[in-house]
Image (spheres, helix red, strand yellow):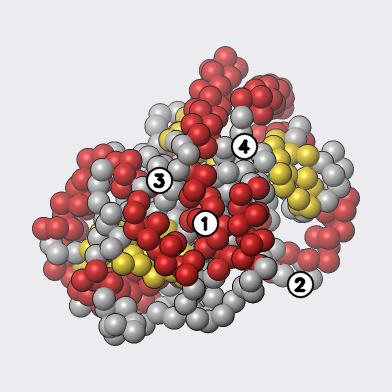
Amino acid sequence: MQFNRSRELYDRARRLFPGGVNSPVRLMKHLPYPFYVARGEGPYIWTVEGHRLIDYCMAFGPLILGHRPRPVEEAVKRVLEQGWLFGIPTELEVEYGETIRKYYSTIEMLRIVNTGTEATMNAIRLARGYTGRKYIVKFDGCYHGAHDYTLVKAGSGAATWGVPTSVGILEDVAKYTIVLPYNDVHALEDTFKRMGDQIAAVIVEPVAGNFGLIIPDLDFLKALRQLCDKHSSLLIFDEVITGFRLALGGAQEHFGVKADLTTLGKIAGGGFPIGIFGGREEIMKLVTPLGPVYNAGTFNAHPASLAAGLATIRELEKRYPYEVANRAAARIARAIEDIAERLGFDVVVKQIASMFQLYFKKGDVKNADDVRQADEKLYLKLHELCLRRGLYLTPSQYEVNFTSAAHVDDVVDRTIATLEEAFRELKLSL
Ligand SMILES: Cc1ncc(COP(=O)(O)O)c(C=O)c1O
């Protein structure tokens, strides 16, 4: 496969944008330049050279129906015919808000913003405003967006590029962010024992999807709930990835553990920019204009995002997208385990619902340190071998592969056959 046009575009782009890209994980660090995409349809994307790739990155999560699902396209077109930005409330936002509240019983009131980053930033500000406390707890490897409160030992691009704690964040801000290992109830108990009365909130990805895939122990989630209750701290579930993915009601429905504040994004915007923070009315009433915790935005509750999000949710209500997407992820995960075992690779595969990731390592993956022990170079080599065969896995070990309703059985069959070939070549290259 030649990527000449991509190389030309990258040569121009790197004079324009830091690293040639507008978000760090788009520059794949094992390739001399990224490939450029021209279009997408179902489970496929086409590069500017016309190569068709089966996509498991899926724009890092929002596209649970696949690329360009017709109901979403139609809904957005209808919005465009009416004009698309007013700075005035719309009927659509009322219907949208009611739909979110229907599936997230802990969200009595919400504010619709533009990105997951804004959602978590506002949720944390609100938790501090509500409790009058300064400290927040987050977990090593969890990523909650690119803002100062949480960009401490963060995952995603921050991990891929080795800057988990960004330069430019004031120590005076970072010192109020306590970072604990994921799935470690003892560390949590110990921290609450020492400083529970100063902790405004614990923010957690209820399934961690930004340091590869780390699945929570149910006891860990329950301990979070209990300790927050005991110490009157707020529990923030960052469901930007898990919302509408694990179930219509996200991780809270899947695990039966409830949050005080919830953040949503990605799927909730059907591929258009969105972020949501919401929770009990008593807390949300502190948000402007009702209360003193400030939030505002020119693009908040953008009609195109609301229409795309609603159309996506309406499709998900039919359930079959979950059945297809979850089956695809489970089949691929089992196939990777099988291939790795036959070829003598030590590989751990994690999968839940329509997310999966593999690690070249022995043992298990329960927290970020376990992921750090994996052989990243082998992952990237496998990634490249798959790419050359038309299979686009997520481009970093610190990200997750996503399946969608478009990853039907024959696409999965071809994926598994390609993985087999790539693993064989990987073995030969060692
Ligand atoms: C769990 C989680 N929270 C927050 C964010 C930030 O969302 P956005 O990229 O829309 O700002 C992400 C993005 O990947 C995420 O995965």
Which residue has dot 4 on it? 406
Q: Is residue 209 visible?
A: no
**Amino acid found under the numbered disc labelled 2:** Leu
CB atoms of marks 3 and 1 within 8 Å:
no
Q: Earlier in the sequence, mark 2 or mark 4?
A: 2
Which residue has dot 1 on it? 309
- Mark-to-mark CA distance, 4 and 3: 18 Å
Which residue has dot 2 on it? 16
Q: Earlier in the sequence, mark 1 or mark 2?
A: 2
- Mark-to-mark CA distance, 2 and 4: 35 Å
CB atoms of marks 4 and 3 within 8 Å:
no
CB atoms of marks 2 and 4 within 8 Å:
no
Say which residue appears at 28% left-offset and 54% top-offset. Answer: 105
Which residue has dot 3 on it? 248
SS state under label 1: helix
Q: Residues within 10 Å of mark 2 (few under 14, many from 20)?
A: few
Q: Earlier in the sequence, mark 3 or mark 2?
A: 2
Tell us which disc is closer to us: 1 or 4.
1
Image coordinates of residue 9 in percent, x first then y, are 83, 60
Q: Nearer the viewer, residue 49 or 410?
A: 410
Image coordinates of residue 144 in percent, x first then y, are 43, 61
Say which residue appears at 76% left-offset and 72% top-offset. Answer: 16
